[in-house]
């Protein structure tokens, strides 16, 4: 091994070592009967290139109230890029495997698991061992059955997007049928979910996107009207659509750019729910005073088990009724995870959920 070490760039040595250790011990694991898998491993925080595919990783085994899932697809979420870069408030211990939204087939269950069994098609809202892998462990409370009408890529587009949209609309904004909601960024994973949920909840739905295709996507998924948020004066058009009254609720995906404008588009008593932000922004607090409006942060991490059950029940009803239809955008094989992370942040306009396939 030493004779080849000089060929490896210094910044990649730690990643190389971790993958090398997996490879060196692969034969001994096979002899002992342990199964092996491929998985993305992150050994240092940084650019997308720190996402390294490692083979010969030991398949984890389910403990009490845990489920082992053979992963067929895993959703890629913007928050995973923040965590990978080291800029997120909560950082995992290194090395780690990213990914929370998987869909696949139950391979095995631990003691105490009764809701699912081996062979069931499932999706998750969180994982214990990371979803960018061929197998993953999830707590049984985070595993939900996937109806036959949805394929695995669609199942991988449910978790964070739909549970976040529901939390923003129902648990935080407390929307009421008949109100008007603006989905500010309606063509991405959370945006599409918010459009479908809002329409099902009886709201008047306005959506924005950065491309004509994105606007069409919003309209085909529940928005009554769509606007191009790259066009000058689009906020005036939104106010015109409300006859000057403003919108009751805004689900905001990029608050560091839009929050100041959001506050000026609200109706009296309006609420802005903050789903995404990539940095700071300056606002005028008087804008909140003028309409007694509220700015509300949304973090799925803080959802209680009771709130998660409520959300899961509504979403499953939506799957059965047919109005919950996850839209899958670009798909990447597992070894292109770094490209997926680049594209989710740099693409000119979102168009559905980005998914890794196994």
Image: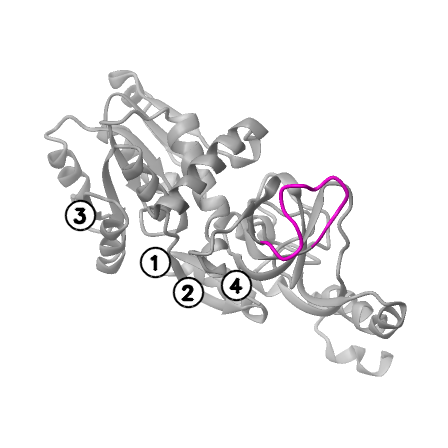
Mark 1 vs mark 3: in front: 1
Which class describes the residues within 10 Å of circle 2: few (<14), some (14-19), or many (20+)? Answer: some
Task: For marks 1 and 3, give the CA distance.
Answer: 22 Å
Residue 104 in sight = yes
- The residue pinned by badge 2 equals 330
Judging by the rendered image, the residue that carries numbered circle 4 is 356
Percent position of residue 179, x then y: 24, 27
Q: Which residue lies most toward the bottom here? A: 3
- Badge 1 marks a residue whose secondary structure is loop
Q: Earlier in the sequence, mark 1 or mark 4?
A: 1
Q: Which residues are magenta?
A: 108-120
Please say if the residues under marks 1 and 2 sit with CB atoms less than 8 Å apart. Answer: yes
Which residue, given by chain and number where applicable, does mark 1 sit on? 351
Circle 4 — which element?
Answer: strand
Query: Circle 2 sits in a helix, a strand or a loop, which is it?
Result: strand
Looking at this view, is 74 or 265 the one in front? 74
Q: Is residue 244 magenta?
A: no
| Secondary element at image label 3 | loop
* For residue 237, above or below residue 95: above
Closer to the observer: label 3 or label 4?
4
Residue at the image position 62 percent from the left and 63 percent from the top? 51
Q: Is residue 131 left or right of residue 24?
A: left
Circle nearer the N terminus (3, 4): 3
Q: Quadrant of residue 26?
A: bottom right
Is label 3 in contact with label 4 (beta carbons under 8 Å)? Answer: no
Question: How far, Cα to Cα, is label 1 from label 2?
Answer: 8 Å
- Cα separation, mark 2 vs mark 4, equals 9 Å
Q: Locate residue 31: give its quadrant.
A: bottom right
Determine the residue positioned at 59% across, 71% down.
335
Where does label 3 land, which residue? 232
Cα distance in 3D space between marks 3 and 4: 35 Å
């Amino acid at each position: 091994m030493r004779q080849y070490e000089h060929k490896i760039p210094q910044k990649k040595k730690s990643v190389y070592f971790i993958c090398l250790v997996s490879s060196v011990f692969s034969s001994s694991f096979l002899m002992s009967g342990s199964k092996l898998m491929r998985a993305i491993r992150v050994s240092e925080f940084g650019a997308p290139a720190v996402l390294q595919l490692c083979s010969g990783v030991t398949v984890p085994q389910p403990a009490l109230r845990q489920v082992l899932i053979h992963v067929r697809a895993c959703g890629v979420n913007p928050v995973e890029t923040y965590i990978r870069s080291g800029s997120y408030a909560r950082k995992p211990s290194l090395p780690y495997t990213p990914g929370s939204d998987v869909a696949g087939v139950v391979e095995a269950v631990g003691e105490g698991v009764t809701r699912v069994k081996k062979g069931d098609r499932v999706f998750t809202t969180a994982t214990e061992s990371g979803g960018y892998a061929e197998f993953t462990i999830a707590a049984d409370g985070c595993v939900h059955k996937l109806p036959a009408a949805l394929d695995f890529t669609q199942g991988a587009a449910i978790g964070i997007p739909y549970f976040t949209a529901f939390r923003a609309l129902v648990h935080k904004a407390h929307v009421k049928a008949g109100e008007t909601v603006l989905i500010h960024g309606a063509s991405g994973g959370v945006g599409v979910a918010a459009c479908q949920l809002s329409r099902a909840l009886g709201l008047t739905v306005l959506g924005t996107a950065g491309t004509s295709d994105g606007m069409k996507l919003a309209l085909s998924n529940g928005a009554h009207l769509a606007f191009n948020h790259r066009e000058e004066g689009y906020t005036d058009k939104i106010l015109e659509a409300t006859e000057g009254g403003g919108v009751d609720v805004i689900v905001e995906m990029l608050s560091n750019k839009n929050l100041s404008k959001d506050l000026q588009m609200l109706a009296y008593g309006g609420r802005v729910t903050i789903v995404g932000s990539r940095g700071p922004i300056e606002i005028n607090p008087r804008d909140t005073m003028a309409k007694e409006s509220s700015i509300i942060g949304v973090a799925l991490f803080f959802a209680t088990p009771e709130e998660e059950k409520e959300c899961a029940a509504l979403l499953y009803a939506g799957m059965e009724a047919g109005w919950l239809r996850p839209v899958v955008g670009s798909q990447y094989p597992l070894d292109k995870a770094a490209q997926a992370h680049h594209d989710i942040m740099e693409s000119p306009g979102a168009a559905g959920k980005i998914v890794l396939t196994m």
